[in-house]
Each structure stands twice: as C-alpha cells, then as structure tokens.
Amino acid sequence: KQGQFAPAVERLEAARRLDAHDPQVVAVEAELIAAGVEQARRAIHEGRLARAAEELKSMRTLGQQDPGRRELEDFLRLARTACDQVKAHACSEARKTVVALSAAMPNVKWLDRVSKQLKEVDDLDLELKAGPLGQWATWQPISPTPPVMTGARMAAFRAKHDASSSLD
C-alpha cells in the first residue's frame, strides 16, 4: 500500500539476513518485487518518470536481477538520454531515442505525442535555419572592409610610404 512499501522492504531485508531461504521470506520477496515493478511501470505509463525512479529506488537491493526491474531501469536511463538531448537542442537525436523508448515499451501512449512534438520542433528549427536569420547567421563577407586609417596610423603610413618612394 501507499507509504508502506519502503518499510516493508526494510523488514524483508532484515528477515533475509536472519534466514534468506525461509519460504515465507522468499514468497514475500517475490510479492514485493512484483508490486514495486508494477508501481514503477504504472508511473511510466502515466508519464511520471521521477515517480517511477523513486519507486525503483525504494526497492533498494530487492530484485536487482529481476528482468522487469532491469527493463524499467534501462527505460529510465534511455529517457534521461532523451531529456539531455532535448536540453542540448538535439531534437532529431532525441526523437530517435524516443523511437527506441517506444520500441521498448510500445503501450506507453505519451511517447507518440512526444515524438510528434520533437518532429515539429525539428522541422521548425530547419525552417528557421533555412530562412533569413539562418542565412544571416552563416553569412561571411567576401572581402573584409579595410580599416579606416586616421590620426597617428595615417601619419605612420605616409612616413613609411614617403621613405620607400624616396629610395627610388
């Protein structure tokens, strides 16, 4: 139940230290692993990734080798990669990562919406880069404008020029 999971895991860990092979301990362990994985999976389906991570963290060492737990941990790591890519404005890479997330958990509905949003952002980015601002951002002058010589720089140039012409 809500709020009772972490204490139950602590009590189970204490019971395992006393007798890890006790059938009741093994049965409760399997039940807690299934409940923790299910809570984390539900949180992912609801789009609450931080909550899913907290659910898995509350399991502590329980079920570390459980395939369901490992699948969810891998999913959350990949989701973190997508977040980092979005932060770095690498939307096309983030979209590829979201496609991989969709393949890992095809029934997660919010992934389709995120993939479409990332495509829209990537398309807008391309349009902006192809437009006037993008062209201006990459424009380089053909030949740089020579600096204007005034004051002391002009006098030094004239003195040098006059000295070289008097040698002729």
Image (spheres, rainbow, N blue to C red):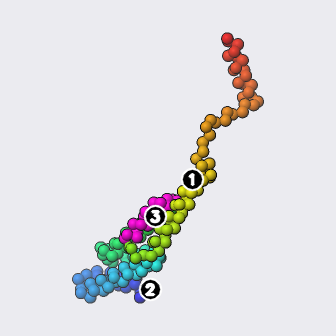
Q: Amino acid at mark 1?
A: Ala
Q: Is residue 131 left or right of residue 84?
A: right
Task: Judge from the rendering whether residue 105 lies leftward or rightward of residue 85; answer left or right.
Answer: left
For marks 2 and 1, the one nearer the N-term is: 2
Give the foreground label among 1 and 3. Answer: 1
Residue drawn at the location 67% of the way across and 16% of the way down: 164
Q: Residue 3 shows which numbered tag?
A: 2
Foreground mark, 2 or 3, reads 3
Residue 95, disc: 3
Question: Neighbour class for label 2 at 10 Å: few (<14), some, many (≥20)?
Answer: few
Magenta portion: prevailing SS class: helix
Q: Which residues are magenta?
A: 88-104
Of badges 2 and 1, nearer the viewer stands 1
Residue 1: where, in percent of width, then height? Answer: 41, 88
Earlier-in-chain disc, 1 versus 3? 3
Q: Is residue 149 magenta?
A: no
| Residue 54 seen by the camera | no
The numbered mark, 2 or 3, whose residue comes first in the sequence reads 2
Percent x, y for residue 23? 24, 87
- Coordinates of residue 109 in the picture (x, y in percent): 45, 76
Q: Indicate left or right for 136 with 62 as reference.
A: right
Which one is in front, 57 or 83? 83
Kind of residue indicated by mark 3: Arg
Residue at the (49%, 68%) spot, across then down: 116
Quadrant including the C terminus: top right
Q: Residue at x 30, y 75 (%)?
A: 66
Residue type, numbered disc 2: Gly
Residue linked to disc 1: 130
